[in-house]
Image (cartoon, rainbow, N blue to C red):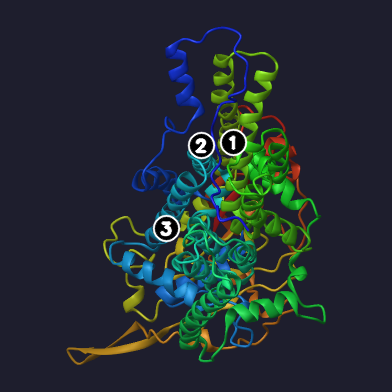
Amino acid sequence: MSANTSTGIRSRSNKKAKRNKPIKDEDIKITKEVLTDHSVLSLTLVTAFRILFIVRCFSALFHIMDDCDEVYNYWEPTHYLLNGYGRETWEYSAEYKIRSWAYIMVHALVGFVTSLMTTTKIQTFYTIRLALAAACSFVEAKFYRTVTEEINPHVGRYVYVILFFSAGMFNASTAYLPSTFAMYCVFMAFSYSLRPVSHVDRSRTYKVVFWIGLGSLAGWPFAALIGIPFAIEEVLIYGRDTTNGVRHPQWRVKRVVRLAEAILLCGLGLTFILTLIDQMFYRQYTVVAWNIIKYNIFNTNGRGPDLYGTEPWYYYILNGILNFNIVFLLALGSALCVCITAYIDRNRVPGNTRMDVAWPYVILGLKLIPFYIWFTVFTLQAHKEERFMYVAYPLLALNAAISLFLIRSWASKFAGVMGADINVRVLVLQYTSFFVLTIYALLSLSRMLALLTRYRAPYVTYSAVWKEQAPDQLVNKNYLDENFPDDVSLKTKNVCVGKEWYRFPSQFFLPSDTRIQFLKSRFEGQLPKTFREDYKVGKYEVDGELKQYRQREYAWLGTRESPEGFNDLNLEDPSVYVDINACDYLVDSDFPLRSSSDKEPRYIQDTEHWDILECYPYLDNENSHRLARSFWIPVSAGLNWGQYCLLKRKD
């Protein structure tokens, strides 16, 4: 096949266009600059990182966790490693081992280092998020530079704008989820896979395999699907580096061997390291990635992901429009755009071999296919969640940017067919993409503002517990009572939650002498249990008097246990609930337009037993207009509100 593996896309004028009138030299100069890539603003890696880091820091500080899995499967185990207590889901039971402690440990190490510079757990929470923001900004910047250098500067610029303004990336970039980590790895993998294939240089193969392998084994195993088109490309395309135009007769065999070698070495090396780390916690040798695959694909007897909810086939289409609006539609239509361009403007994608008619488009198609593979596979699954699409966000941005670049050229070509002069065609080229991206940016900002202004109440409400600290407290700032670590007679206070259990933002938002507890609600599934606390009673003597204090063990014995009552069928375990009389504080929402029940009473109205400490507005999405609640518009009509409140038991 072709030795030319460039995925570059030309920016050029139609040399056959008829000139209706003479063109001035100045017009020729301006036109040349616009129709070629020389005048395109291109950011360096460092500059691109710095600009992206600004918006990612904003995400780290204000992004709202909309997935309880992020809290109970990742933030709570991290809290356990750092602070000695927390909640765990059945996936962390030593009986099932469906979550990797290696992934948690990396974030806990970041939290430990940053905790040396902070005074409260909330600050540690946000510094971990800022570390995620930095990591995401770097991989995005590197991806942008590769697209700019290997495909086209215009396409690179569009990718950058799409990533910068995306409401989806605002949510995904600093989410503490394996799918976000896998997304980081996809950014890195494509930073190398977009480069030309080489038969001599093995580094491209190893780097792509490593990053896809890391995202799959340490993050989410299904991310390996992204690597299928890359493997095809490795075997299908020889590369540019021939010797006197002569190829090795067995080059495909050698390429298969090289690819298998990279997969074997990277796979075994990563699996070995991850297995050792997980063994430190589970005290069992296990490959967590395989456990995840077994449960999600090969499970029987009613087990599997469908237990946790199913969605219609069009769920990801609606979700994509919410998070990427018109850009999502451009990504879906990228294959069609390439086919149309191949017919009406064949030379837009360069090529110079005997297969010049089709081959460059085959190469470009291999870069577009991963998005379609991911979107199709997960659309066919009954259980759907927004976070499952995070892995494909880099691919979505790339496909959409290529579509926009090609549509831009169509518009200019159409203007020429309609008799427009060269100056008009230049304006069409300049403003087609500007118009599309401006609409995209405005809709994205509207979506982000809707999320930030209407659903932030849980963060404010739980954080209000800290106001119960003494105003002059100078030490042990993580506690309501500064004497708690040194006085074992002091008891923890219970912060209870009923129907709002899934919006709890983690115990990083609660003082360390409080514990989250669950009240029975209408929910009938399985709720997280408590890790075995990593504390013991320490003793010391002062002037002959024996003193006792709470001492960290750093043994994390809870990671190797199989708590009774956990199951993989999402069956309710009543032992997780406490009686309401055991609650010192209570967090609940109150929506006037919704009905109450015995299991979900309106606690806010029970002024006989509870004082209101803090309330914050929270959108009643069930009783609000679908479009009005999805996007922020000044003076939006059709919105109904409730309250999200922190209550304190009366003495």
Q: Residue at 76% across / 48% down in the picture? A: 594
Amino acid beneath label 1: Phe
Residue 516 visible (yes or no): no
| Residue 405 - label | 1
Q: Are marks 1 and 2 in contact (CB under 8 Å)?
A: yes
Q: Marks 1/3: CA distance?
A: 28 Å
Q: Residues within 10 Å of mark 2 (few under 14, many from 20)?
A: many
Amino acid beneath label 2: His
Q: Residue at 54% across / 77% down in the picture? A: 100
Residue, disc 2: 154
Q: Looking at the image, is 38 positioned above or below residue 478? A: above
Amino acid beneath label 3: Ala
Residue 65 left/right relative to 513: right
Tell me which label, 1 or 3, sits earlier in the chain.
3
Q: Residue at 66% across / 19% down in the picture? A: 415
| Residue 136 - label | none
